[in-house]
Amino acid sequence: MARRLSGKTIVITGASSGIGRSTALEFARTAPDDLRLILTARREDRLNEVMAEIRAEVGPGVKVLPVRLDVSRSDEVRGFVGGLPEGWREVDVLVNNAGLVKGVARAPEIAEADVATMFDTNVTGLINMTQAILPIFKTRPDGGAGDIINIGSIAGREPYPGGSIYCATKAAVRSFTDALRRELIATRIRVIEVDPGQVETEFSVVRFYGDQSKADAVYAGCEPLTPDDIAEIVVFAAGRRENVVVADTLVFPNHQA
Ligand code: NDP
């Protein structure tokens, strides 16, 4: 697998924490000799910490470029792609991981601003990034290979009370991903979705506006996945032989109802 990933340039959104951070580390561990990782998120300090972790763990064979980027801002996304330095422009893999949930509440009580934030980030942000990166794949000298790996959610398949908007965003991700895969069938671009169940990350606290006791209650009776569990699946999918598409994977903890 290291051989297939070696030499690749990989963009990860939401790489400052949780699944995105773990995915960066897992790519680095898997192909430590020759890899370029472009780590994006809004919190630059956290991206720099992830870069330092990678350097400490795998050494200088993995080149890391941290870039502050809000995926919901199409102007920033365009500027990001246009501003990639020489040597970093031939992106091979895009991991669309950035996402969030605002609160758990019945549909009528969800604030308009929170609805907008969830859709702008989880759906429009993912589409912004995909639209910006696809032309790079198509113009590559090697004939247009590339991977789009979208992090959806079990919530996009099994909507739950109190999560209507978040679930709707992840259902939209699923629908977009399926359509894109069909549009690109028989090209060398693979479109992949990984749908996690409960994973212990900052996500569970963000969801409750920082209230740790409410976050802890989410995992009562269930041992959640770790972000590494999801990172391993993402890297596995990217490391398959070009003709193999790990198209659609649902991963949840054994005890999740
Ligand atoms: P985290 O909160 O740890 O990570 C979310 C990441 O998204 C952060 O790096 C954050 O970075 C980034 N992000 C949020 N908004 C934006 C934005 N507008 N622009 C750029 N980056 C942004 O949570 P997870 O690691 O758990 O979440 C990762 C993905 O996994 C999400 O798509 C989530 O929906 C999905 N998921 C999570 C599950 C879970 O149980 N944890 C279950 C199923 C799916 P920053 O704040 O620095 O911008």
Image (cartoon, grey):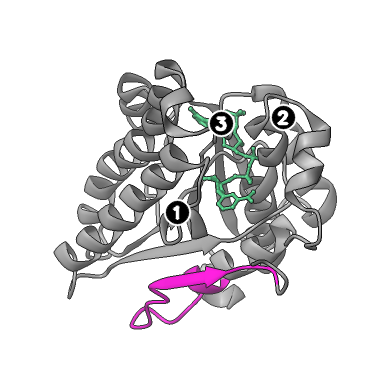
Q: Which residues are magenta?
A: 236-253
Residue 72 seen anywhere in this rendered image of the structure: no
Give the answer, above or below, for where 55 lies relative to 246.
above
In the rendered structure, which amino acid carries the disc numbered 2? Arg
Instruction: Judge: label 2 CB < 8 Å from ligand 1.
Output: yes
> In the image, 107: left or right of 205?
left
Q: Secondary structure at mark 2?
A: helix
Q: Nearer the viewer, residue 50 or 17?
A: 17
Q: Secondary structure at mark 3?
A: strand
In front of the other: label 1 or label 2? 1
Residue 22 seen anywhere in this rendered image of the structure: yes
C-beta proximity under 8 Å, tags 3 and 2: yes
Give the answer, above or below, for where 104 lies relative to 151.
above
In the rendered structure, which amino acid carries the disc numbered 1? Pro
Label 2: which residue? 46
Q: Residues within 10 Å of mark 3 (few under 14, many from 20)?
A: many
